[in-house]
Image (cartoon, coloured by chain):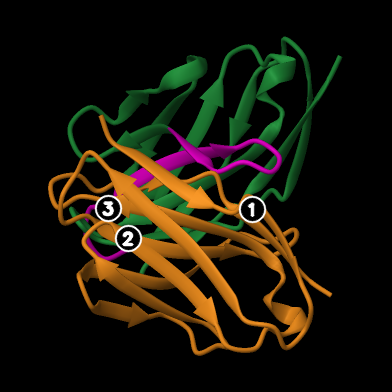
Amino acid sequence: SQTIHQWPATLVQPVGSPLSLECTVEGTSNPNLYWYRQAAGRGLQLLFYSVGIGQISSEVPQNLSASRPQDRQFILSSKKLLLSDSGFYLCAWGDEQGAEAFFGQGTRLTVV
Amino acid sequence: AQSVTQPDIHITVSEGASLELRCNYSYGATPYLFWYVQSPGQGLQLLLKYFSGDTLVQGIKGFEAEFKRSQSSFNLRKPSVHWSDAAEYFCAVGAGAGNMLTFGGGTRLMVKP
C-alpha cells in the first residue's frame, strides 16, 4: 500500500533563516505531488504541484520554492523565511487514475 | 476556474444530534467532489468522494454526502454525531484524474456533551 512521509512534524525558525521540508511517497510510481499551506484559521492554499521529476508549477508567487529531485521526493524550500511564512504545510500525492489526494501528517512551521 | 464555498465557519451540535455541513461548488462540467476531515495538528483524511453514478455516496465513520447538480451542492451528513467527530471538515472539487484539488475554507465542528 502507499504511504506518504513528511518531516519534520514541527519546526521553529528565526526570520531570515533557510527552510527545507521534505516529503516522500512509497508504494507508487510517478505520482502527482502537491504542497499546500494552511494559515491559522484558514483553508488550504495550493502552493506547488509536480507531475514529474524536475517539473514544478507554482500556484502563487511567494518566498518559497519547490523541487522534485527524485520521482517520489518533493521538497519545499526557502532561502530566507518571513514571519508570514508561518503555517501548517501539507504534502499530498495523487495518481493519474484516481482524482483524490492523499495527505501527509503536516509540518507546523513557526517563524519567530 | 473552479471554486468551493463552505458557508459555515463554525458549527456546534449536541452529541447524538444529526449533522449537515454545507458545500457549494462552481465548475463548468461535472466535478469530482470530496470531503476531508482534519483533526487538530494532523493531516487530512478522505471521508468520501463522488465521481459519477449514484448521487448519494457513503463514506467512512458513518458519513454520507449527496450531490445535487441543480444546486451545485455536495452537503455532508451524519445522522448521529459522536464526540470524536469534533474536527475541521473540508470540501474539495477536482477537475478529473490527476488534477489538483480546490478546497473550501473549512467548517470547524464542535460537539457538545
**Is label 2 or label 1 in front?**
2
Residue A43 higher or lower than B50, as above or below: below
**Image quadrant where one finds the N terminus of chain B:** bottom left
Chain identifier, orange in the render: A
Q: Is residue B56 magenta?
A: no
Please state if B6 lies on the left or on the right of A100 as rendered.
right
Residue A75 higher or lower than B15, as above or below: below
The number of discs equals 3
Residue shown at the point (19%, 44%) measured from the top left: A28
Q: Label 3 is placed on what type of residue?
A: Pro
Q: Is residue B44 magenta?
A: yes
The stretch of residues the image draws in magenta is B27-46
x%, y% of residue A29? 15, 50
Please state if B35 lies on the left or on the right of B110 as rendered.
left
Q: Which residue is mark 2?
A: A73
x%, y% of residue B30? 22, 53
Element on which disc 2 rests: strand
N-terminal of the pair, mark 1 or mark 3, is 1
Label 2: few (<14), some or many (≥20) within 10 Å?
Answer: some
Q: Which mark is residue B31?
A: 3
Label 3: few (<14), some or many (≥20) within 10 Å?
Answer: many
Residue A73 higher or lower than B6, as above or below: below
Residue shown at the point (49%, 51%) measured from the top left: A6
x%, y% of residue A84? 73, 80
x%, y% of residue A105? 54, 44
Q: Chain of mark 3?
A: B
Distance Cα–Cα, label 1 vs label 3: 19 Å
